[in-house]
Image: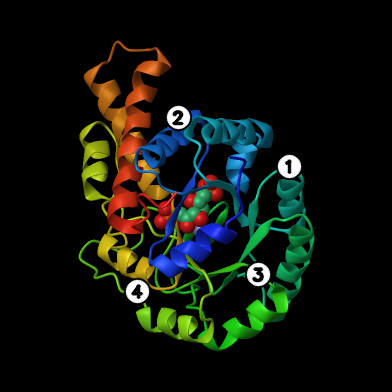
Amino acid sequence: MPLVTTREMFARAYAEGYAVGAFNVNNMEIIQGIAQAAAKLNAPLILQVSAGARKYANHTYLMKLVEAAVIETGLPVALHLDHGPDFETCKSCIDGGFTSVMIDGSHHPFEENITLTAKVVAYAHERGVTVEGELGQLAGIEDDVNVSAENASYTNPAQVEEFVAKTGVDSLAIAIGTSHGAYKFKPGQQPQLRFDILEEVERRLPGFPIVLHGASSVVPEFVRQINEFGGKMDFAVGIPEEMLREAARMAVCKINIDSDLRLAMTAAIRKHMAENPSHFDPRQYLAPARQAIEDMVAHKIETVLGCAGKA
Ligand code: G3H
Ligand code: 13P
Ligand code: ZN
């Protein structure tokens, strides 16, 4: 099966009350770990590449690695640009074989966001590629942009119909209290998601796929492991998994996870190196890192996303 767009994936996810995992990829071991978990659980998959990942690993290398994952697993896989910063980056990914792109105009004023997003949609749709837009701003770090909690803003549900109608986007990322990175809430803080906003968006856009960014749960076990084996990370609270599962039962069809994979991978490498100080063959520490990614993704598919068996 060739790479697919998100269109059918989301239609089924919406109808059956689950979400598809969108996992960030940067190298071969990450792609293999994710693909292996999805294959074992027969789950649909979105592999997403940020502008930073593309700069780090090179478009063609990532493209070919993702194509290899499709061949090896036979799963429906969408290759998605995460947080496309401008029209040119989206165009380059569309021309280069991505099946889905996000244009992130969320930091622009509403009208400018509409104009930019509509331009990307026109180009993408002519070429059979699906587009994710964003309204509202999450706190946290994405690429080089660091949005402070004070500057973050929830999505205004009164704007969503106009945004979707005028841009023609296929899915919409909204801000309901999730945030990017490994430091979302301080220890002891009680994470709150604005389910009232999600409900109102769902009421205004019946049947329309919604996306949640910043959805890592920052599993403390991995932060503990990183610190136990020479790391120095502060503890933080992420998004509780049961809240994400609830969102996936509603209109949320795509849930973005990156930080939890980074933590799992780094914890595995630190542990391996600490316990095997004489090892210098990268395969010796990258194999457990890949396995940690696989275990994490399998856990997300079963516990958070609900998409096992839906490929
Ligand atoms: O939301 C951003 C993703 O976690 C990607 O992060 O831009 O550092 O690759 P990155
Ligand atoms: P996390 O940092 O919570 O994993 O979010 C990732 C994300 O939203 C990628 O777009
Ligand atoms: Zn994001």
Q: Amino acid at mark 4?
A: Leu
| Disc number for residue 29 | 2
Q: Which residue is mark 3?
A: 169
Q: Are marks 4 and 3 in contact (CB under 8 Å)?
A: no
Q: Residue 161: image x %, image y %?
A: 60, 84
The quarter of the picture showing ligand 2: bottom left
Kind of residue indicated by mark 3: Val
For the residues labelled 2 and 4, the Cα–Cα distance comes to 32 Å
Q: Residue at label 1?
A: 96
Q: Secondary structure at mark 4?
A: loop
Q: Residues within 10 Å of mark 4 (few under 14, many from 20)?
A: some
Q: Quick one: 187 or 101, which is closer to the camera?
A: 101
Q: Image check: 56 left or right of 284? A: right
Label 2 – label 1 distance at C-alpha:
22 Å
Drawn side of residue 195 relative to residue 32, left or right = left
Q: Which mark is drawn over residue 193?
A: 4
> Residue 125, percent across and down?
74, 61
